[in-house]
Amino acid sequence: MEHDELIDLERRGWQALASEPGVARQFYDDVFDERIVLLLSDLPPIRRREAALDALCGAAWVEFRLHGLRCVRLTARTGVVRYSIAGAQSALPYSAQVSSVYARRPDGWKLTFHQRTRR
């Protein structure tokens, strides 16, 4: 089911973020759509692919826990995954609400929008 695919893709993204930055960068370079919008609480909106890779794939996550993962299909070719995260990046505690929008492309699901709002 596509819902499970998108939730699995989101989980794999966090696993990549918890490993080496090069692993995370390769994962997101493959998953990012050609057009990406990244909204992180501490930064202005990011709309350039390279800048989004830099912002997302910097310091590795020391730990993370995803809660309440839900996927909603918006259209036949788009879906959004919503959840909350608690964890630590570079030993700094972090908690946020997260939304990721995926679009179905000929080469698979691509992340087109990712938003994190700190709690």
Image: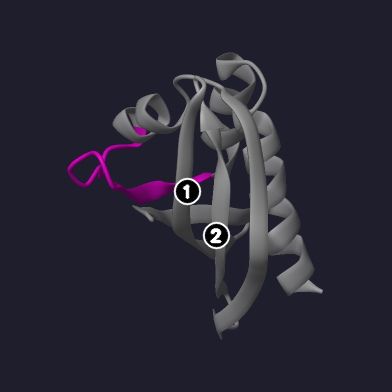
Read off the residue under disc 1: 95
Residue 4 colored magenta?
no
Q: Which residue occupies 57% across, 75% down?
A: 77
Q: Is mark 1 on a helix, strand or loop?
A: strand
Picture quadrant of residue 73: bottom right
Indicate left or right for 118 with 5 as reference: left
Residue 26 to residue 66: above or below: above
Residue 55 to residue 76: above or below: above
Q: Tell me the amino acid under the disc marked 2.
A: Ser
What's the mark number on residue 84? 2
Q: Is mark 2 on a helix, strand or loop?
A: strand
Residue 107 vs residue 22, the one in the foreground: 22
Please provide the residue range marked out in magenta: 32-49
| Residue 117 visible to the viewer | yes
Furthest-right residue in view?
Answer: 1
Residue 116 to residue 22: above or below: below
Decide: marks 2, 1 in contact (CB < 8 A)? yes
Residue 40 colored magenta?
yes
Tell me where residue 51 appears, x and y as whole percent: 30, 30
Indicate left or right for 81 with 32 as reference: right
Earlier-in-chain disc, 2 versus 1: 2
Furthest-left residue in view?
Answer: 44
Tell me where residue 58 appears, x and y as whole percent: 44, 21
| Residue 107 visible to the viewer | no
Q: Which residue occupies 56% across, 52% down?
A: 85
Tell me where residue 87 appears, x and y as whole percent: 57, 39
Q: Which residue occupies 63% across, 74% down?
A: 71
Residue 86 to residue 28: above or below: below
Colour theme: one colour
Q: Which of the image's four quarters has the C terminus?
A: bottom left
Q: Tell me the amino acid under the disc marked 1.
A: Ser
